[in-house]
Image: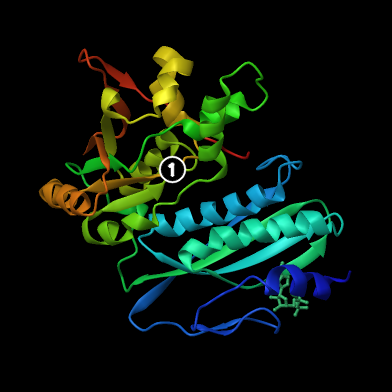
Amino acid sequence: MNEFALINQFFKSIPQRRDDVILGIGDDAACLRLPSQKDLVISCDTLVADIHFVADWDAYNIAYKAVMANVSDIAAMGGTPRWLTLALTLPCVDKVWLERFAKGLGDAMAPFNLALIGGDTTKGPLSMTIGIHGTVPQNQAIRRSGAKPGDFIFVSGPLGAAAQAVAFLDKKDVDVNHKNSLMDALLYPKPRIDLNHYLLQYASSAIDISDGLAADLNHILKASHVGACLLWDSIPIHPLLKQYQGKKAVEFAIKGGDDYELCLTVPAAQKPHFIKALQEKGLSCFPIGMIEQQQGLRARLNNGDMITINPSGYSHF
Ligand code: ADP
Ligand code: MG
């Protein structure tokens, strides 16, 4: 099977229903009709076998997760995801693998009505780069640099499930139901596109916390030239973490990563409106602390003690 047959069979066949794709897969470049009054937001992620995923994982899961990680970056900007590109490097043409990969890709794209508009296919050690393009209303992309002292810090959901799943990967003596529910969090992350309207309306800054809350909140702090104090016991963690991590549960959850929730800041005056607007739609975010003038990341424990948080997260080099 040559490269072009492969592209046609596995990628061109993924259904797409966007009328803003003038030209998709098959020409020298894709051509898109841009909506007026919008800015383009673009991100890409490279996944390398045995660094970002285990090469013998079901290819469905590799593709699914790769798309969700990209969607999460657009969510953090307050954007709406629209178009994907895929640069795929394969050691060989394995049709069963490609079928699973394409199925995972299609299933992940469908809920966001994403279109795969092009890419590149090459031979080499297994790796992939997915590029995502989305839109935000003009001048409204949510940045990391907008946090101000006095803003409340929110996180969009409980943390730590994916990291606990990773910790369980090669453990055999774990409750199967627990392991399965944690693996679901690792394999099927749900990027928070559902919050984009509220981010645009209320957030002064936002970031997706795929590298862990501590490390990613620290990016907001650095970009905004501010510090933060968290209320340690208000940080939402997955209910199974207490059982498996004991006293270390919160620390484990904020350093873990792979959660694909969002961390955002909201000016104090907007906080009640933000919470009410979410409630009206059956959504919620968890207030976990405040932005302060004093640089650095710290937390107040229930007994009043202060601790300094070392914001280390995943770093490639
Ligand atoms: P070129 O030689 O002009 O770079 P290619 O032969 O690489 O074009 O690709 C042919 C078409 O298939 C292009 O439209 C390209 O965007 C698309 N394509 C190639 N690989 C992929 C892929 N893995 N997924 C989606 N589209 C792809
Ligand atoms: Mg090419």
Q: Who's the residue at 55% across and 36% down the image?
A: 314
160 and 313: which is toward the camera: 160
Q: Is residue 119 visible?
A: no
Q: Specify the quadrant that holds the N terminus.
A: bottom right
Q: Who's the residue at 30% across and 52% down the image?
A: 205
Considering only vertical position in the picture, is 27 above or below 314? below
Whether disc 1's CB lies below 8 Å from ligand 1 is answered no
Q: Position of residue 212 (x, y in %)?
A: 46, 36
Q: Is residue 36 visible?
A: yes
Q: Position of residue 304 (x, y in %)?
A: 20, 15
Dot 1 lies on which element?
loop
Where ligand 1 lies, by quadrant?
bottom right
Q: Amino acid at mark 1?
A: Ile
Q: Who's the residue at 29% across and 24% down the image?
A: 232
Which residue is disc 1 drawn over? 209
Q: Position of residue 291 (x, y in %)?
A: 23, 39
Query: Label 1 neighbourhood size at 10 Å, few (<14), some (14-19), many (20+)?
Result: many
113 and 163: which is toward the camera: 113
Q: Residue 200 lies in what quarter of the image? A: bottom left
Q: Residue 149 lies in what quarter of the image? A: top left
Q: Position of residue 181 (x, y in %)?
A: 51, 33
Colour scheme used in the picture? Answer: rainbow
63 and 294: which is toward the camera: 63
